[in-house]
Image (cartoon, helix red, strand yellow):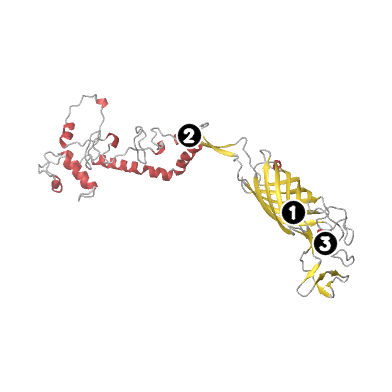
């Protein structure tokens, strides 16, 4: 009897901790089961014809001027700071072609210095001017295989330059001296008899002062623009652009020096140009994603997929891999290991337990009703139908031979007499169960060997 009880306790303990052991040793498989199940229902698919919306780009750069008044430096990254805003729209799904609309706000300047030809001591600086342009761009994405991170591009277009109005620094002004600069062959600059250096105050408008007899002209122009550079892909919606554009204007008056001048500095017949080297950040805020997540009504599984990973036979939300009670009826609440709740721990789940508050350790029937001692005795002496010998099997309940095995009319050993509560010189089944329960509740002075001996004595009575 004790061996059966101990075996049952061990079995219940293992079942209680089995889910934790499964989680610990098979956590990877459990994660695969749950994750794989989700992946079967939710799939990422490519959108056939995504809707592409305009992409916004904001950048900064420098402008370099090319014309009659050549600066000492010829460096694409050294010049007047300027700003650029750009909006472009994709024209195809592969993003090879796009159309750009952009604007630039900035200034440009230039100067020349000569000791031999004193007329070639001229300088200029435009007022802040604005350009508005449009161009068609081609990205060389087809030269790559796989994912593209760095994409070269080229574009061609046109722009309108609004009110560049160049000014020049020809007057020196200070608190005690004012007058025009006079350049000498020895390289000095004087105002009257005083040696000075330029104050770089561009106070004189070329158009209104007309120092070279140019006359009135239009301070706006059109320009042809070529742009080349690289896009560095940061993410699907963000790219960093490094580029340089050349702007060929249809005017020779941006620097105030023109072939139309009649006195002083007379220029050539070539139109003025400038370059703009910039870096910009392009962000796609509004386009539809190239892929989307769809939810399937049914999991479409093919191949050698292991269905036991996601099996849940009783549909209690506990996978069979960790379900201790895989045949729970539908709708019955279960615990973390898939077994119906049993609040009084009598072995009968709540949903069929007629007495859900049975006494601790009580013997109950199949419906959880507590059995009295008389009921237990009656069940032991009930008439049972005869069976063939080959249909029977033995369940060992004793511990084998003991010193009480061959004794008859044995007396209760002294150490067990306290168990005989009713004093009838016989240890009953209820008294045996009570002693065993006290032992497992740690409310007994007996050792494990004593319990085994008590069990042997009980069956020897």
Q: How far apart are marks 3 and 1 (CA)?
A: 29 Å
Q: Report the side of 335 relative to 144 (left or right).
A: left
Q: Which of marks 1 and 2 is in front?
A: 1
Q: Position of residue 135 (x, y in %)?
A: 73, 45
State the residue position of label 1.
Answer: 276
Q: Distance between the residues labelled 1 and 2?
A: 62 Å
Q: In which quarter of the image is residue 170?
A: bottom right
* Residue 234 visible to the viewer: yes
Q: Nearer the viewer, mark 3 or mark 1?
A: 3
Query: Circles 1 and 2: CB distance less than 8 Å?
Result: no
Query: Circles 3 and 2: CB distance less than 8 Å?
Result: no
Q: Nearer the viewer, residue 232 or 12?
A: 232
Q: Where is residue 400 in the image (x, y as percent from the top left)?
A: 23, 39
Q: For the residue carrying disc 1, how many other residues have a C-alpha within 10 Å: few (<14), some (14-19), or many (20+)?
A: many
The kind of secondary structure element at disc 3 is: helix
Sequence order check, earlier mark of 1 and 2: 1
Q: Nearer the viewer, residue 278 or 1?
A: 278
State the residue position of label 2.
Answer: 306
Q: Nearer the viewer, residue 236 or 109?
A: 109
State the quadrant of the N terminus: top left
The kind of secondary structure element at disc 1 is: strand
State the residue position of label 3.
Answer: 209
State the quadrant of the C terminus: top left
Query: Circles 3 and 1: CB distance less than 8 Å?
Result: no
Query: Total number of numbered labels?
Result: 3
Q: In which quarter of the image is residue 219?
A: bottom right
Q: Residue at x 38, y 37 (%)?
A: 323
Q: For the residue carrying disc 3, how many other residues have a C-alpha within 10 Å: few (<14), some (14-19), or many (20+)?
A: few
């Amino acid at each position: 009897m004790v061996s059966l009880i101990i075996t049952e306790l061990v079995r219940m303990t293992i079942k209680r901790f089995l889910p934790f052991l499964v989680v610990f040793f098979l956590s990877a498989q459990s994660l695969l089961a749950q994750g794989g199940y989700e992946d079967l229902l939710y799939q990422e698919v490519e959108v056939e014809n995504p809707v592409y919306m305009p992409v916004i780009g904001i950048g900064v750069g420098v402008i370099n001027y090319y014309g009659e008044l050549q600066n000492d430096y010829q460096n694409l990254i050294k010049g007047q700071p300027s700003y650029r805003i750009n909006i472009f729209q994709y024209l195809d799904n592969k993003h090879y072609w796009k159309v750009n609309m952009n604007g630039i706000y900035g200034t440009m300047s230039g100067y020349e210095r000569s000791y031999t030809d004193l007329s070639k001591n001229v300088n200029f600086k435009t007022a802040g001017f604005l350009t508005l342009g449009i161009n068609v761009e081609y990205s060389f994405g087809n030269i790559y295989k796989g994912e593209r991170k760095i994409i070269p591009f080229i574009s061609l277009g046109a722009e309108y330059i609004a009110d560049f109005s160049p000014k020049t620094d020809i007057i020196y002004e200070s608190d005690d001296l004012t007058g025009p600069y006079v350049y000498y062959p020895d390289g000095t600059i004087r105002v009257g008899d005083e040696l000075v250096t330029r104050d770089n105050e561009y106070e004189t408008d070329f158009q209104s002062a007309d120092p070279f007899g140019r006359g009135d002209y239009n301070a706006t122009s059109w320009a042809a623009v070529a742009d080349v550079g690289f896009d560095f892909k940061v993410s699907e919606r963000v790219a960093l652009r490094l580029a340089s554009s050349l702007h060929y204007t249809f005017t020779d008056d941006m620097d105030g020096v023109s072939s139309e001048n009649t006195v002083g500095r007379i220029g050539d017949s070539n139109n003025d140009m400038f370059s703009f080297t910039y870096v910009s950040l392009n962000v796609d805020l509004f386009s539809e994603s190239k892929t989307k997540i769809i939810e399937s009504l049914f999991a479409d599984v093919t191949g050698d997929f292991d269905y036991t990973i996601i099996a849940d036979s009783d549909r209690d939300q506990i996978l069979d891999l960790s379900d201790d009670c895989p045949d729970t009826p539908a709708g019955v609440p279960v615990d973390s290991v898939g077994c119906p709740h049993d609040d009084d721990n009598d072995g009968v789940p709540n949903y069929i337990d007629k007495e859900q508050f049975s006494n601790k350790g009580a013997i109950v029937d199949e419906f959880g009703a507590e059995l009295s001692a008389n009921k237990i005795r009656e069940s032991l002496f009930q008439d049972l139908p005869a069976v063939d010998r080959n249909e029977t099997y033995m369940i060992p309940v004793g511990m084998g031979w003991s010193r009480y095995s061959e004794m008859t009319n044995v007396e209760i050993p002294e150490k067990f007499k306290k168990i005989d509560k009713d004093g009838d010189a016989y240890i009953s089944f209820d008294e045996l169960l009570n002693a065993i329960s006290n032992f497992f509740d740690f409310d007994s002075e007996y050792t494990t060997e004593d319990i085994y001996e008590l069990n042997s004595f009980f069956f020897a009575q």
